[in-house]
Image (cartoon, rainbow, N blue to C red):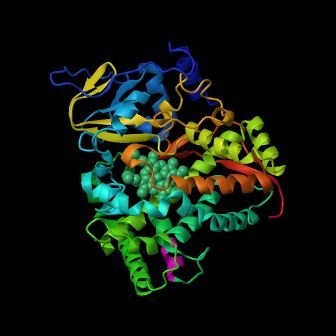
Amino acid sequence: MSAELAQSAVIVRNRSRPAEGETAASPAGPAPPGTAVRLPPSLPIPSYRQTLRFVSKPLDFHLSGARTLGDVWAVKIVTRDVPIAVTCHPDHVKSLFVADPADAPSLTGDSPLRPILGPTSVLTLVGDQHMRLRKLLLPPFHGEAVARYVEMISEVTERELDSWPVGRPFALAQRMQAITMDVIMAGVFGVACPPRQGTAEYRMRQTFSRLMRISAHPLWALVELRNARRIQARGVLRATLAVVDRQIYGAIARRRAQQARSDRTDILSLLLEVRDEDGKGLTDAELRDQLLTLVLAGHETTANTLAWTFERMLRTPAAYDRLHELVRSDDEGADEYIEATIHEGMRMRPVVPLLARLVKRPWQLGEYVVPANTPVAISVLALHHREDIYPDPYTFRPERFIETKPGTYTWIAFGGGIRRCLGAELAKAEQRVVLRALARRIDLAVVDPADEGARQRNVTMIPRKGGRVVVQSKRAG
Ligand code: HEM
């Protein structure tokens, strides 16, 4: 455990909490008319330091808030006019997830990613338009639909593992990204993996990688929408987006022309067929925004989640050995342990550590009441480290999820309510395949036994060094 986290751990443990497994109820939701505003306390450090901490020490940013101020606190980020209320209480989470969408819309509507993803992206739309798109997009992401991709994920994974060097350290996140990018290109566009050099698909993959690099700056997450639009209007981002548009519209046109081939199961082909209640399908512009959203939302998140899980597990030999043992002996408990490992990895290191809503009415958060139009953020990370919900929260222990399903409002690594991650089943399918294949074939070790810190990459929290590992030995596929 890093010194930064050790300090948080000690203090969180010392806070007075209800008995193990019990969380004291806390009233939350739209405040009755006439309720006086009572703002949560702010961290006693200047806003520039809070901003710096958010960008460069996200673990500390989240955990020190809960450590010093309890369930709710306020944060001031230099690039934003209004302070943000942050909560980590499951009752408050529930109030925001089940709220009427008009009362607590997602703040992604204001996201700096909006100019990149496009005005009709399901990720950044709010209200009725969001619900229409979400319904249209859901079918290709159901469990059964995702099951069709498992073989392809397996092939991509085995090929990638074949190429891993023995005895030479590398960052897992990058290698995982090679897998998740191939999976998303195959799943979304039906592209052969890996795409052949010189093909339109190959060029599209290169452009997506370039776009990811450009939009990855940690400060991008802090930029307000109006400034993001100004940045986008200039230079390299604008030029890259022009190429993205040309390539995606090209792929849509080619697929429309081949649409008679109804056996295709890639997401683009399925989306060309969907119709809403009025019989209306998606326009090309809407398709472009969704396809780009799926690629950008779907591959770095999964890759870094996998990197984090190994970063944690390799520093907990009991868990790593157990996984190896169960998988290598074909034990019937292996599937359950893999599932529990995925949940535990995402509990300790949720790559989306903050979910933001904008309350449109005065909102009660325990003993506090924030005024209408306050951004309210849920600290997924602080919620996942509550000792009353997760005893010994700083220990990586998949066993806590054996025979216990993650709670709807206490385990929220994929968000919740009407904004819950559309790709959750796909992301979990990828993790299952990769965890099993690695446990079967590869013996990994850490390069540096000290914990890796975290850093912010756009809206995600990633391992500072990408999850550095070394392959000690490898079995054939
Ligand atoms: C481990 C990997 C992933 C994690 C941790 C993750 C996490 C999340 C979270 C927390 C949200 C909700 C954001 C909010 O409430 O503000 C979200 C939304 C979303 N995710 Fe994921 N995601 C992952 C993988 C994927 C994949 C593979 C795809 C698609 C291929 C995807 C597509 C989406 C979309 C489209 C939304 C927007 C849903 C909506 O607003 O209705 N994600 N994701």
Residue 1 is at least partly visible in this image: yes
For residue 97, what is the image quadrant? top left
Question: Is 203 part of what is drawn in magenta?
Answer: yes
Question: In terms of secondary structure, what is the magenta stretch mainly?
Answer: helix
Residue 64, how many percent across, how many down? Answer: 47, 26
> Where does the C terminus fall, quadrant-wise?
bottom right
User: Relative to 422, does residue 19 appear above or below in the rendering?
Assistant: above
Residue 169 is at least partly visible in this image: no
For residue 446, what is the image quadrant? top right
Please name whichever residue, 448 or 321, is drawn nearer the observer in this view of the structure.
321
Question: Is 98 part of what is drawn in magenta?
Answer: no
Span highlighted in magenta in the image: 200-205
Which residue is at the far left?
A: 34
Whether residue 120 sits left or right of residue 186 in the image: it is: left
Please name whichever residue, 3 or 131, is drawn nearer the observer in this view of the structure.
131
**Residue positioned 47% across, 71% down in the render:** 207
Residue 231, how many percent across, how many down? Answer: 30, 59
Whether residue 338 sits left or right of residue 280 in the image: it is: right
User: Relative to 153, does residue 85 appear above or below in the rendering?
Assistant: above
Residue 258, how many percent across, how many down? Answer: 45, 86
Q: How many marks are shown on the rendered structure?
A: 0
Residue 235, how many percent across, how many down? Answer: 34, 67
**Residue positioned 44% across, 72% down in the render:** 270
> Where does the N terminus fall, quadrant-wise?
top right
Please name whichever residue, 411 or 384, is drawn nearer the observer in this view of the structure.
411
User: Relative to 386, does residue 333 appear above or below in the rendering?
Assistant: below
For residue 7, what is the image quadrant? top right
**Residue positioned 30% across, 73% down in the render:** 283
Whether residue 204 sits left or right of residue 165 in the image: it is: left
